[in-house]
Amino acid sequence: MAKPKILVTRKWPQETLDRVAQVGDVTFRDPDTTMSHDEFMAAATTYDVIMPTVSDKIPAEFYPAAKGTVKILASYGVGYNHIDVDAARANGIAVTNTPDVLTDCTADLAMGLLLAAARRIGEGERETRAGKWEGWRPTHMIGKKVSGATLGIVGFGRIGQATARRAHFGFGMKIVFQDAWDVPDDIKAANGNATQLPSINDVAAQSDFLSLHCPGGADTYKLINAEVFGAMKQGCILVNSARGDVVDEDALFDALDSGKLTAAGLDVYHNEPALDPRFLSYENVVLAPHLGSATDGTRAAMGFRAIENLEAFLAGKTPRDLVS
Ligand code: DGY
């Protein structure tokens, strides 16, 4: 491909935009909003390369329409549940993502949400800002103790492991987890002396905190449902920095109402950014706007990694992060 026509769908950090401009004939889409259905359909017959982000919902009709024109979706982000990988493959479109570079930041955020939910930081901040704080008193805003508690992890990949290390080696938490792969003992030892349990219900039953680190998409859709909340230890705290559709939000509200869940720390939602308005009435739910990878350096590293994958593809090599 002499000079590939490339579409960058969102505003990336400037240094990565400057770098991608050297790779081909680049269209930098403006405004910085989610691509619409019509834009995707027009892009399907215009560009050799599309570099979408995790917030671009690619319509089903895009894939057959893009066949023969779009050669690669070089995505910016580790999760790729916004892409129908099978449909891309069937229509000769390669898919890459950007793992590794955001692992630490996302694990940091998971711990931040855990601490904020456990120690009622959002609630306390609102009270203080509103001028309603009546001063220190022994029974004021009592939270849940983190140190020494048990953290359950669903999905023991890179980010799940990084969260386990922080929780165990930093906060003395006991780690139990569920994952479909049989995790070798050395990986369990290095990542928080973690114990693998057979099912999510087993993990939920033992955990004071449950943190989600599995991918989104059809396989994990509403994985955390009424049955899992039912199996949970009373007063557990749920942390979700993975994908919103992993949690059945109706079941989540029921669990909050019944006290099964004492609090939650969330970074992702079913229909983000249009949150279910019920969330706003729960003081004990910390609501973050999908900030897992949002640190200086990390968002640039994601862009550089997407470009690295693209350049490998254009050079006829196998990209480092080829999903399909
Ligand atoms: C990802 O990369 O999948 C995150 O959700 C965005 O940071």
Image (spheres, grey):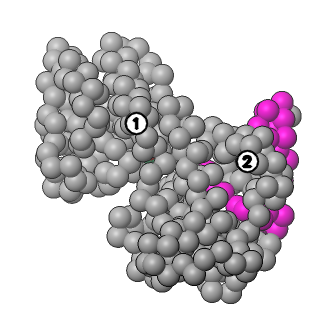
Label 2, residues with CA under 10 Å away: few <14, some 14-19, many ≥20: many
In the rendered view, does 296 fall on the left or right side of 125? left
Q: If you read the primary sequence from the N terminus, does the residue marked by circle 1 or circle 2 appear first?
A: 2
Residue type, mark 1 in image: Asp
Q: Position of residue 116 (x, y in %)?
A: 60, 62
Q: Residue at x 53, y 41 (%)?
A: 105
* Span highlighted in magenta in the image: 186-213
Name the secondary structure under disc 1. loop
Residue ID for mark 1: 296
Q: Residue furthest bottom?
A: 258
Q: Position of residue 32 (x, y in %)?
A: 21, 49
Residue 115 visible in image? yes
Quarter location, residue 224: bottom right
Q: Residue at x 72, y 62 (%)?
A: 209
Q: Residue at x 70, y 61 (%)?
A: 210
Residue type, mark 2 in image: Ala
Residue ID for mark 2: 167
Query: Could you say which disc has been placed on residue 93 in the image?
Result: none
Label 1, residues with CA under 10 Å away: few <14, some 14-19, many ≥20: few
Q: Position of residue 100 (x, y in %)?
A: 54, 31
The residue closer to the viewer here, 8 or 17, is 17
Quarter location, residue 208: bottom right
